[in-house]
Amino acid sequence: MGLKPVTTPDVEAATIELTLDGEIVQAKEGVSLYDVISSTGKIVPAMCYHYTFDPFGSCGMCLVLQEGKKAPVRSCTAKAAAGMVIQTEGEELFLARKKGVEKHLSVHPLDCPVCDADGHCELQDMAFEHGVTNLANAKQKNIPEDTRSLVLDFNMNRCIACGECINICKDVLRIDALQFMKKDGFTQVVAKGDQALDCEFCGDCLAVCPVGAITNKFSKYAYKPWQLKKTTTTCNYCGDGCQIYVETKDTEVVRVTSPLSWKNKWGDRTDTVNGHDGICVRGRFGFQFIDSATRLKAPLVRTDSGLQPSPWLDALDMAAGRLAYVKAQYGAQAIAGLITARCTNEDLYVFQKFMRSVIGTNHLDSSARYGHLNFVRAMKHALGLHRMMNTSEEINKAKALLIIGANITETNPVASLRVKSAMGLYKAQTIVVDSMQTNIAKLASHPTMVKPGTEGLYIQGLVKSVIDQDLIDEDATSAFPEALDSLRQAVGSLSLEDIADQTGVDLKHIHEAARIFAEASRSIIICGEGILRHAGGYQHMLHLIDLAWLTGKLGRKGCGINTYTEEANEQGAVDMGVAPEFLPGPVAFTDSQAREKFGRVWGNNLPDSARGANLMEILDRCRTGEIKALYLVGENPLETLPASYEVTSALAKLEVLICQDPFLTETAKMAHVVFPASTFAEKDGTVTNQEGKVQFLRPALDSLGESTLDWHIMVGMANGLGSPMEYETTQDIQNEIRKVLPGYYNLGKVPHVAPHLSEYFSKVLPREASSRYSVITKSATQRPFALRMIQLIYHSGKLSTQASGLMEISPNMSRLRMSAEDFKNLGLSAHVRVRITSDQGTVEMGVEEDMSLMPGTCAVPEHFNDPPVKDLMPLQVDPVTGVPYFKLTDVSIEKV
Amino acid sequence: MSNPTATKKFFDAVLFREIWNAMKVTFKHMLHRPITFQYPREKRTIPDAHRGALCLLRYEDGTERCVGCDLCEVACPSHCIKVISEEDKTLPLQRYATEFYIDITKCVFCGYCVEACPVNALAMTKVYEFSTHDKRTLLFDKARLYQIGERHIDDAKKYLYAHNQEKEGEEGRAYRYHFPVSIKSTQEP
């Protein structure tokens, strides 16, 4: 049932009664009559209606008879009122609706045979249902097709002006990229200002278009809907875990769609707090990597003449033989493994079991180490939690949101819609803290620009401000007076003026933000790469926890600390214990009870509890020669880490480097054995999204060539090493996970996790607080610009650069993004190249103006390595969590 | 006791009447024109509506009629048609079939595909001889189908007229929808 006029979750609308086809039904006052009718299960045709936005009322199909009115009324725009007597069926209504279809059809071209929507077209269905066979005054519009956009074609001859595309873009996506425009005598949908469409390209307008007026360029004319095999699976790009339909024809992926469609238009608008079922540009248009020609099709083995294709048995035999040799010669501690968090839970579980029980080493890590583990370790340390605290529904209904260092519209576009709707629909106050003017900041009530790298300092300022303004929540803090005292003492030495000066934020604004956050009944923190991937990330997480605790936001319903993950299964990697410090669960690796349990299930003793090496330590030990063999599953440290870290020389020292990847990456080119792995569309298994929902992957295609599932390869190697793992299907692994982690397969329902407030606040915090708060004054440097590596909405890691569609939308521009002011000051123009110099080196590249940057900040997308901007970055490793920080540095820039 | 049946039998036997009857048939056929054809030296005249080998047709200016709409594929009861379509890169916004296969060994010659075709690109001809040493040649591809179409264009046209699918001039235009040949894009080339 619709949401209007109630926009706050705290107020309930009055319940009224009305008569529908002779039956009395109850409804909320003021909602659309159409919603009331559809909630009873009756279906009245409507072509311009979709539950995700307010009724528009242009198609004239949802006619019903209301007692007391002569002509039929449009039920979607009529408001339900007490005592209405409504009739939804009958000859008169049928004829009136038929007239409506005829009106649309008389100006609609009958080019169904070449239309991509043929067979999936609401107008076609309506014409068939109402028996429209003869059109007296048919005429053609003859409007030229708008093909200016990179992704979507607009054929306005077919448009029925239902406005669904415009409404979803405005009300749900809150981008507002489309509009109606009267052109050539017809009302047409055009991009804002009749320019070429340039938006986030989520394609939700394409999904809701009930006719073929908006079509997809990447699969234009390549299919008819009935030819496609639809497989429901989970998107593999980011941690949102959107459900997608991979639609295939024979052995190729033709398009990707999602449950959002004009076909399921009936729903309750309040349900959109859990998602609107749409997807983003990466999910919808980034599918080409699945059947890319550059995929590996057979195992490769290094010979004298380089990497050569080899039969599976030989390659497995060689890899296992070499690992066995290293293990016999140098011991199990000389072997290490890294896995990408894009793998399924089953792959991750088998991987850590393979490393720990077959090889017998605890040197293993996943790509969650690049940031997410800062969050997990801090939450685990302080609150005993291992993932974000709130569901999307709670985020949606928040009263105040503190989004800090998170460019969520770019990194997690679909999850960001919940924040957008919290702001738009529920009028949440939003404080967005970032060194760029992000898209979410443009919509926020309190956008705050801080100087690059001072997000953590800003949090300290908030903590100080909360204490100074006495915004402390008595109920929450009274249980731990020592902790409160220690915090008071710790921040006592801080000067807010210093912080205001360092961060570049007005003192008044820090106080205001602290007040908003502390006083709201439901406040939520969302932090992102600006906190977790910039130096001091672990400390900053602890500051955030302090802030939430002081203001009483821990443990209260609807409040909490959250993060969104970059890769699809980072949460799963943590849950499956793919980190030296965790066992599946995650429980601490040193926990003797857990060690005993897993030792029993796996049938052999776990490696020594002496600390296993994490990602950076593994690479260090490769360089020193302690680690002789490295097993990489989908990881590509060579292209991820800056050159100053000398990954090349570390990898060159290895006696055995085994890579397992769908593509021949730079790292794989150095390998001794390369195994071809399947992509997500070929896998079955599960992935855990950032919220903790476990969702299924289902194979849409057979694995390309000889490539196979990641766990198949691990099982093959385990067999070669003489300690076979008895798995035949993915279900076997799932059964084992069910045994060791009861209740892990929660079937899409997220079990609530309550923070555990005792030991940390009574013992640990009083001890730690004093050393935690300090303002480090940045030393003056010769390099006036801060260079940031940023993420783009069109890309995710390096995987998306293999998708030709996304590369067409967002190619590697090789351009440094700079603010307009710096552009002027340095006398730059679009054709000029600049030389960027940091302490680590020099790179030359083009420049472009970016309105979202502050003067003194410049940015480069991190997805491309050409030119190698990442090599300018110094690398700093977190002393506690071992997270590498290499996303921000100071540079000087000069014109070439 | 006289029995008429017995009497008749007696006379038939004496007069060899059955032989006379047989000879009558024999001599009649000596004067009759033969009705068998000396196939394959002689061939039967085939009616226009005959459903024989399928073919693809072009417009008078030589452009392909087929727009790759896949409707023949979905109409085919024996699933013997396979169409792979794409946007024509040389003529933007035009759909065409990059590949078109008809497995004539599976075809049941029902003519539904011709009925389904919105542009009359498919037609049936009077070709019915498919015997071959290599069964693979009976998987007609696009080139082969156009070849048949060119060779038997008259028969194909006659088929369409006979089945009321195509009519001459304005009358035909009213009966069948013609696709817009080109929707010009607003994009500067």
Image (cartoon, helix red, strand yellow):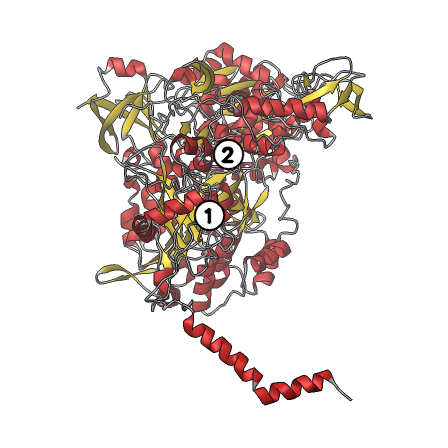
Mark 1 lies on a secondary structure that is helix
Residue occupied by mark 1: B113
Q: Residue at x 38, y 50 (%)?
A: A618
Residue A831 horizontal/vertical position (percent): 21, 22
Please say if A249 is above or below A857.
below
Tell me the mark number nearer the camera, choosing from 1 and 2: 1
Q: Quadrant of residue A315?
A: bottom left
Q: Is residue B38 visible?
A: yes
**Which quadrant of the figure contains the N terminus of chain B?**
bottom right
Please say if A331 is above or below A506.
below
Q: Give the total number of marks visible in the rendering.
A: 2
Residue B178 horizontal/vertical position (percent): 41, 32
Mark 2 lies on a secondary structure that is loop
Q: Is residue A397 visible?
A: no
Q: Quadrant of residue A800?
A: top left
Of all chains, the one bearing label 2 is A
Residue occupied by mark 2: A279
Q: CA distance from mark 1 to mark 2?
A: 38 Å
Q: Amino acid at mark 1?
A: Cys
Please say if A841 is above or below A600.
above
Q: Between residue B61 and residue A600, name the one nearer to us.
A: B61
Decide: marks 1, 2 in contact (CB < 8 A)?
no
Q: Amino acid at mark 2?
A: Ile
